[in-house]
């Protein structure tokens, strides 16, 4: 009987450890854990009562006193660590140490989440042992907004829910909000954020692109060696942010449509007709928003269209001899900008690059309407100038700065103009206060298929569209696809890691322990 009582203490401790261990794994204290821990405590108490004399004798020994001190110290440290972990779990602060910010959401995503006005739910359909990357990502989303909830569903265990959403494959995530549903099949922050935008907004604002004068075509896609000058990537990116994109031939219209939220004129080769210009002016005077992009001669300058808004289009080509562009295989005719005006459009653009293939410079007119406010949005560096001898540049590809004729940098490539209006607005509401928003770029190539994904070109273009559409929460730096960063080892390097990590280091630790043990025995 005494022999069995000696084992009771071990049994009690094991039962308590099993109960606490299962709780740590499941985070749920069920009936099983309760019964197990109570049984363990009863057995442990019985063991103590049955062995009181031996326990007193044990604790009276000198060696036990020293051991008890060490045990108390260890328990105290463990208690402190548990308390710190408890506090940290409820007031956590996250630090992402990965170079590509793999575990951090983009500024745009965070801004959208913090501005959510409606509840959005994500349901991810993965196998029980899969989808960890998506789980980490959705947890980040939920961390930044109480309006965002998510759950994981195993289609094999809950086929009814999978059938309800029409799920036919693993890895599909359903985003819901305002009665709308979006499905995504990639573990991608960009796709999740775009889906949230679509289900959390009522209706779609329309962006019109003009045509008929050789403007950049939003339907021309990049295919092998063709389509680099198209705007298909720009169109897709705009649509991903819940806008509707349409073409418009102004010559066949009586006015700019009243549902036009943003009018885009992208690099026309020939000038607009007089009645088309009148339509654009009328649209702007009533509080419309327009993005006008012009290229160097012989393309149309649209100087008389933007002049009433205090912007002058220079007849030059911006050249950049700073050498920065050469790092990307770009010559001096592709200026690289890293200086930006203070505007929501370029917030967070400090020390990031945008590139402009064949651009002309702009400037604010000395005499302009005092009610117009300006921001010089994009500027080149000091080692640039505006080449005015275009014939020499195009025909002979020779350039040289001419004092008094060419203008030294920094040069302005983009200007924002705003003006408050109180008139019959484009929406037909008399007396409503609105603000005309106009952005003029001296280049249209920066948003083409060939340049859209260069550094922050795409972000700049989309920010311009969102700001013009008065969607300020979409104005930010957008999420990037995570980089596939791998380390490829040679056979020799693999052998070194194996011998050092698997053989030598563990043996060294064991050897050190044996030496200490032998010395203490002596």
Image: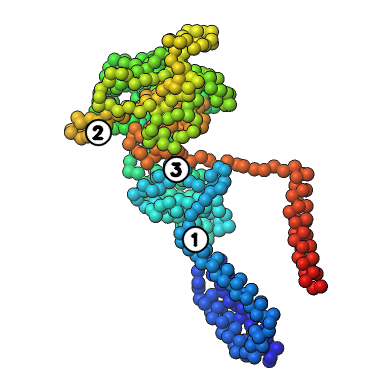
**What residue is pinned by disc 1?**
88
Find residue 203 and report its horizontal and vertical position in percent. Answer: 33, 41
Residue 347, quarter of the rendered image = top left
User: How busy is the neighbourhood of tag 3: few (under 14 within 10 Å), some, or many (20 plus)?
Assistant: some
Look at the numbered discs 3 and 2 and tell me whether their residues touch, using CB distance below 8 Å.
no
Lower sequence index among marks 1 and 3: 1
Q: Is residue 109 above or below residue 206?
A: below
C-alpha separation, residue under disc 3 versus residue under disc 2: 28 Å
Instruction: Look at mark 3 in the image and give the residue it sits on.
Output: 107
Instruction: Give me the residue at 39% from left, 39% from top.
Output: 474
Q: Horizontally, is 328 left or right of 208 in the view?
A: right
Residue 408 seen in this snapshot: yes
Answer few, some or many: residues within 10 Å of disc 1's Cα (few below 14, many 20 plus, some between 14 and 19).
few
Which element type, helix, strand or loop, lies under badge 1?
helix
Count of labels in the image: 3
Which numbered disc covers residue 434?
A: 2
Query: Which residue is at a point 78% across and 44% down the rendered structure image?
Result: 492
Mark in front: 1 vs 3: 1
Residues 446 and 366: in front is 366
Q: Residue at x 75, y 61 (%)?
A: 509
Residue 101, percent from left and from top: 53, 44
Asked if residue 96 is positioned above or below residue 276 in the image, the reply reads below
Tell me if mark 2 has few (under 14), some (14-19) or many (20+) residues whose alpha carbon lies within 10 angstroms of its own. Answer: some
């Amino acid at each position: 009987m005494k022999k069995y009582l000696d084992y009771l203490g071990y049994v009690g401790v094991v039962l308590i450890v099993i109960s606490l261990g299962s709780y740590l794994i499941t985070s749920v204290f069920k009936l099983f854990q309760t019964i197990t821990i109570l049984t363990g405590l009863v057995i442990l108490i019985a063991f103590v009562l049955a062995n009181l004399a031996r326990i007193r004798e044990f604790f009276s020994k000198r060696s036990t006193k020293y051991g008890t001190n060490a045990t108390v110290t260890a328990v105290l440290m463990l208690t402190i660590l548990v308390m710190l972990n408890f506090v940290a779990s409820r007031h956590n602060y996250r630090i992402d140490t990965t170079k590509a910010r793999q575990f951090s959401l983009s500024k745009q995503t965070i801004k959208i989440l913090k501005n959510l006005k409606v509840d959005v739910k994500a349901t991810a359909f993965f196998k029980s042992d899969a989808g960890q990357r998506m789980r980490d990502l959705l947890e980040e989303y939920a961390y930044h907004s109480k309006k965002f909830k998510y759950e994981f569903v195993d289609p094999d265990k809950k086929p009814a829910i999978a059938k309800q959403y029409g799920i036919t494959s693993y890895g599909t995530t359903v985003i819901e909000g305002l009665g709308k549903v979006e499905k995504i099949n990639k573990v991608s922050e960009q796709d999740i954020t775009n889906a949230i935008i679509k289900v959390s907004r009522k209706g779609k604002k329309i962006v019109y692109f003009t045509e008929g004068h050789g403007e950049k075509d939003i339907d021309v896609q990049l295919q092998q060696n063709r389509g680099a000058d198209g705007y298909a990537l720009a169109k897709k990116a705009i649509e991903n942010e819940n806008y509707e994109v349409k073409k418009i031939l102004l010559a066949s219209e009586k006015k700019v449509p009243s549902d036009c939220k943003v009018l885009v004129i992208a690099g026309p080769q020939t000038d607009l007709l007089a009645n088309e210009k009148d339509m654009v002016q009328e649209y702007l005077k009533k509080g419309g928003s327009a993005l006008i992009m012009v290229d160097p001669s012989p393309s149309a300058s649209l100087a008389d269209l933007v002049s009433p808004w205090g912007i002058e289009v220079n007849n030059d080509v911006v050249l950049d001899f700073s050498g920065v562009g050469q790092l990307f295989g770009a010559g001096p005719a592709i200026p690289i900008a890293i200086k930006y005006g203070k505007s929501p459009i370029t917030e967070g653009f400090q020390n990031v690059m945008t590139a402009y293939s064949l651009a002309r410079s702009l400037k604010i007119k000395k005499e302009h309407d005092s009610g117009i406010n300006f921001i010089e949005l994009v500027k080149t560096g000091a080692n640039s100038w505006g080449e005015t001898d275009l014939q020499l540049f195009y025909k002979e590809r020779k350039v040289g700065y001419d004092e008094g004729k060419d203008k030294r940098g920094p040069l302005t490539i983009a200007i924002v103009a705003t003006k408050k209006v109180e008139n019959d607005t484009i929406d037909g509401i008399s007396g409503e206060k609105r603000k005309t928003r106009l952005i003029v770029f001296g280049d249209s190539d920066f948003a083409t298929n060939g340049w859209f994904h260069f550094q922050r070109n795409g972000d700049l273009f989309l920010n311009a569209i969102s700001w013009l559409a008065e969607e300020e929460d979409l104005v930010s730096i957008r999420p990037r696809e995570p980089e596939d960063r791998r380390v490829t080892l040679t056979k020799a390097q693999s052998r070194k890691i194996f011998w050092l990590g698997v053989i030598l280091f563990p043996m060294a630790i064991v050897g050190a322990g044996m030496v200490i043990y032998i010395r203490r025995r002596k």
